Amino acid sequence: MNIPLDRDKPTALPRQIQAHLERLIHERLLTPGMKLPATRELARQLGVNRGTVALAYEELVATGWARAHVGQGTFVAERPASGAAPVPSSVAAPVVLDWSGLFSRSAQILGADDERSRAVTPIPSSGAVVSFAGGMPDSGLFPTEAFRRVLNQVIRDEGPALLQYYPAGGYPPLRRYLSTYLLRFGLEARPEEILIVNGSQQGFDLIARTLIDPGDFV
């Protein structure tokens, strides 16, 4: 299979492979049920590592273009028949509601103060300037591709159960992992003794409610 890859493009190679295969499937050059080349073989043909092709296949499966069978390979998935009702060309404009008059007076004052602050010290839009106003870390430091692979694997493994509520104490596999991890530091905690919180603020709130009485010095 010949898939042109441009290594000078900002688009990642897995995404280029994925987009090319999606086009072939959309144009029915790859028909439903057809087996895609093995990741090792396609990687050899394209001159890339196997993980690059595997990531492209994972995305095809996650977006519904393909289906994977353990021990058998990856196959083109059935696609909905084309010919669905066309989208209307003209859509009535939504009614715009002015919320400003519905806010409390204190909220309006805070909003006006925020507008004045933005007017005095506007946030620069230049890519050469890094703003720390939001207190957010550099998103480029996050392992996006690795996180995507893990996320796709979890969705495949958990299936619809992933969309249900889990115990209030937190995701059970995570609690079991943390129990094992803490042993490295000499901390013995059973999974049922570990509580997963949504963030530091919730953690501080629970600690305060549990250990502090009104009037205590902190």
Image (tube, helix red, strand yellow):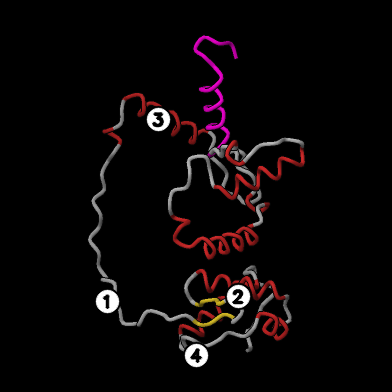
Identify the residue position indicated by label 4 in the image. Answer: 29
- Give the image quarter of residue 50: bottom right
Q: Position of residue 168 (x, y in %)?
A: 48, 40
Magenta-drawn segment: 198-218
Identify the residue position indicated by label 3 in the image. Answer: 112
Q: Earlier in the sequence, mark 1 or mark 2?
A: 2
- Nearer to the camera, 172 or 196: 172
Q: Position of residue 166 (x, y in %)?
A: 47, 47
Q: Which mark is residue 16?
A: 2
Q: Earlier in the sequence, mark 3 or mark 4?
A: 4
Residue type of the residue flagged with mark 4: Leu
Q: Answer whether labels 4 and 2 touch (C-beta < 8 Å).
A: no
Q: Describe the element under mark 4 as helix, strand or loop.
A: loop
- Give the image quarter of residue 102: top left
Identify the residue position indicated by label 1 in the image. Answer: 85
In the picture, measured across the screen, residue 96 lies left or right of residue 4, that is left
Residue type of the residue flagged with mark 1: Ala
Residue 133 visible (yes or no): no
- Nearer to the camera, 205 or 166: 166
Give the CA separation, mark 2 to mark 3: 47 Å
Residue type of the residue flagged with mark 3: Ala
Q: Position of residue 44 (x, y in %)?
A: 73, 84
- Seen in the picture, residue 174 relative to 149 is either above or below; the reply is above
